[in-house]
Amino acid sequence: MSVTRATAADVALLARLRCRLWDGTRAEHAAEVAALIDRPSFAAFIARDGDRAIGFAEATLREYVDGADVGAPVAFLEALWVRTRDRRRGVARALLTAVEAWARTAGCNTLGSDADIDNPDGLGWHAALGFEEVGRTVNFVRAIALPATHGMD
């Protein structure tokens, strides 16, 4: 198994892998990755077994992450996915190691992440790899009615 940093040549592959993790079309994911891939604040890594992609991770640099020191840049693990049959083989750990190495070169001393509260596998993975839980959030949204314009501008 090898882990390499993704380049512009990997946009289509990352789009395909992202579809395994998130909703959206390959075209939508490809457009998003293409807009991010060359930014210094973004990095993506692909795990391969021979010529087959078996996982990926994406990370960004953020100015603020809950539980991290204010004022210091923080790397944030935006995504990590490993093909089901390749789990528990160290692939996720290898992807995380690549993300941490990138974060160190960017001057970060903290890596943030999140997991859905109803994802026990994700919560357990984070705990097993040394992430410290710093809070839980339930997000809400409420529609509001817009005032009628009555033809006035």
Image (tube, rainbow, N blue to C red):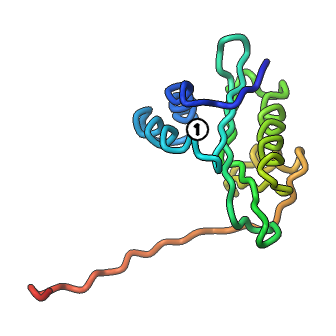
Left or right, 134 with respect to 151, comes to right
In the image, residue 60 lies at what x, y percent?
A: 66, 50
Q: Residue at 40% across / 34% down in the picture? A: 27
Report crowding for label 1: few under 14, some 14 to 19, many 20 or more residues within 10 A (C-alpha): few
User: Which quarter of the figure has residue 134?
Assistant: bottom right
Which quadrant: the N terminus? top right
User: How many numbered marks have been drawn onto this rendered protein structure?
Assistant: 1
Quick check: 141 above or below 50? Answer: below
Q: Nearer the viewer, residue 61 or 119?
A: 61
Q: Residue at 47% across / 38% down in the picture? A: 29
Q: Which amino acid is tagged 1?
A: Leu
Quick check: 14 above or below 127? Answer: above
In the image, residue 36 lies at what x, y percent?
A: 54, 44
In the image, residue 116 lies at what x, y percent?
A: 67, 54
- Identify the residue at the far left of this view: 151
Q: Nearer the viewer, residue 105 or 94?
A: 105
User: Which quarter of the figure has residue 100?
Assistant: top right
Q: Residue at 79% across / 66% down in the picture? A: 72
- The residue singled out by tag 1 in the image is 21
In the image, residue 56 lies at what x, y percent?
A: 67, 32
Quick check: 56 above or below 72? Answer: above
Left or right, 14 with respect to 48, comes to left
Quick check: 17 above or below 138? Answer: above
